[in-house]
Image: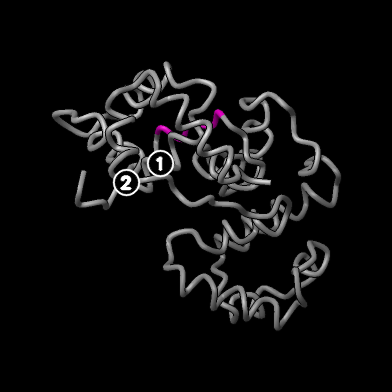
Amino acid sequence: MGLTAEKLRSGLDAIAAREPAMARALAIAGYPEPRIRATGYATLLRTIVGQQVSVAAAASVWTRLEALLGEGIHPETLLAAEFDALRGCGLSRQKQGYARSLCELVIAGSLDLENLPADDEEAIAQLVRIKGIGRWSAEIYLLFAEGRADIWPAGDLAVQAGLHKLLGLEARPNEALARELAEPWRPHRGAAAIFTWHCYNNPAL
């Protein structure tokens, strides 16, 4: 399960107690809503389907895939599907390659999504073996689906822009600086990440 409202609140309160800028932003913007996704294969497949397209377009592709392959789109069914049939659903050649990589790892048992390593970096290393799943996608999965409390997607542009706004920085920090700035927030950086997204477009900040 992802980070619940209670966990977000306690994590942000802990950061705000030692970070005045966070306390100020929290007073203005309030607590963010939880962002929770299901664990497992389907969430990662949805991630692949949704890459570089709008939310509406991704939902349309998913609906067509389920109509073709059945609800949940089992990995064996997807692997058996014809290339042209998948392309007709809106799945490009590249994304078909990514989806097949995920299915093959799951079917072979070499990627057990219900028992990823407890160590965050080891879990990320497992996930990025899937073609098309980079570090950012792996971090988002671990944060939203597994609710890992200290995941910090420092390469995310909205996280960087949120830090720029929250901390009153002169410029948007790069990934390295974003990691450095959040070090004092361990072990609650997951809540901080969700809060940066919450604050990103807030005009009051």
Query: Which residue occupies 56% across, 49% down?
Result: 132
Q: Is residue 54 inside the magenta stretch?
A: no
Q: How is the image coloured?
A: one colour
Q: Residues within 10 Å of mark 2 (few under 14, many from 20)?
A: some
Work out whether 187 lies above or below 111. above
**Magenta region's main secondary structure?**
loop
Q: Residue at x 77, y 47 (%)?
A: 105
Q: Secondary structure at mark 2?
A: helix
Circle nearer the N terminus (2, 1)? 2
Q: Position of residue 129 (x, y in %)?
A: 66, 39
From the viewer's perspective, tell me whether residue 108 is left or right of residue 140: right
- The quarter of the displayed image where residue 146 is located: top right
Dividing the picture into quadrants, the one containing residue 24 is: top left
Q: Which mark is residue 29?
A: 2
Q: Give whichever of 145, 22 is nearer the camera.
A: 22
Distance from label 2 to label 1 (Cα)? Answer: 9 Å
Residue mark closest to the camera, 2 vs 1: 2
Please tell me whether residue 3 is drawn above or below residue 99 in the rendered image. above
Residue at image position (45%, 42%) is: 194
Q: Is residue 152 magenta?
A: yes
Proximity of marks 2 and 1: CB atoms separated by less than 8 Å = yes
* Nearest to the observer: residue 108 or residue 121: 121
Q: Which residues are the magenta region? A: 150-154
Q: Which residue is mark 1?
A: 195
The percent position of residue 11, horizontal first and vertical second, equals 51, 31
Residue in the picture at 33% in, 30% down: 23
In the rendered picture of this protein, how many numbered marks are placed on residues? 2
199 left or right, relative to 14? left
Image coordinates for residue 89, horizontal then vertical, percent: 60, 79
Label 1 CA crowd tier, 10 Å (few <14, some 14–19, many 20+): many
In the picture, which quadrant includes the C terminus?
Answer: top left
